[in-house]
Image (spheres, rainbow, N blue to C red):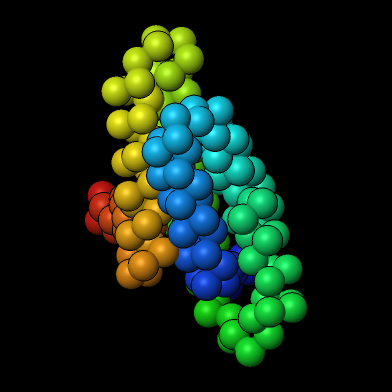
């Protein structure tokens, strides 16, 4: 049996809510430097595992102090890592839109797609990127 790395679903939802809020506030005050910063944060989670994300580290600190009674809700790390990778790619494209192509519509449009999907995860627990990953795995299994 494969040793599956697990993450706390609560931490994923916390991080998603935080990044969604940061992106929406950055859009509202036109602080576009936040887009590549959030891309970096998601990219760290995608590359090294969600526990390497700054949002996850903040959640761990809060859970150790303020949220002591919260029970972990484990889930396999691979689907969230895929979702973070997709979010990173969208935010990198948003960064290109903002800085290289000087298109606020493209840049903020892509960044706000990420914010909406992150807000969906934070408020409902539905991770669209995770569902896409699982669908790809099911289709791959049917094809073999």
32, 48: nearer the viewer: 32
Residue 128 spot, x, y in % from top left? 32, 55
Residue 81 spot, x, y in % from top left? 52, 51
Q: Is residue 88 above or below residue 75?
A: above
Q: Is residue 76 above or below residue 135?
A: below
**Residue 114 seen:** yes
Q: Is residue 85 above or below residue 129?
A: above
43, 25: nearer the viewer: 25
Rendered image quadrant of residue 119: bottom left
Residue pushed farthest front? Answer: 29
Residue 74 spot, x, y in % from top left? 54, 76
Q: Is residue 13 left or right of residue 144?
A: right
Rendered image quadrant of residue 121: bottom left
Q: Quadrant of the N terminus?
A: bottom right
Residue pushed farthest top? Answer: 101
Identify the residue shown where x is 63% and y is 60%.
Answer: 56
Identify the residue shown where x is 68% and y is 61%.
Answer: 58
Q: Is residue 36 above or below residue 133?
A: above
Rendered image quadrant of residue 106: top left
Residue 38 spot, x, y in % from top left? 55, 40
The number of callouts visible is 0
73, 78: nearer the viewer: 73
Q: Is residue 42 left or right of residue 105?
A: right
**Residue 86 seen:** no
Q: Is residue 38 left or right of residue 107?
A: right
Identify the residue shown where x is 60% and y is 43%.
Answer: 41
């Amino acid at each position: 049996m494969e040793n599956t790395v697990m993450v706390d679903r609560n931490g994923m939802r916390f991080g998603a809510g935080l990044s969604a809020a940061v992106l929406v506030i950055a859009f509202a005050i036109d602080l576009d430097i936040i887009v590549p910063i959030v891309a970096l944060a998601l990219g760290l989670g995608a590359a090294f595992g969600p526990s390497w994300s700054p949002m996850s580290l903040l959640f761990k600190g809060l859970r150790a102090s303020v949220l002591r009674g919260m029970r972990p809700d484990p889930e396999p790390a691979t689907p969230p890592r895929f979702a973070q990778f997709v979010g990173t790619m969208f935010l990198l494209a948003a960064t290109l839109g903002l800085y290289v192509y000087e298109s606020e519509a493209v840049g903020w449009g892509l960044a706000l797609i990420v914010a909406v999907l992150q807000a969906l995860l934070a408020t409902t627990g539905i991770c669209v990127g995770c569902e896409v990953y699982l669908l790809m795995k099911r289709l791959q299994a049917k094809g073999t």
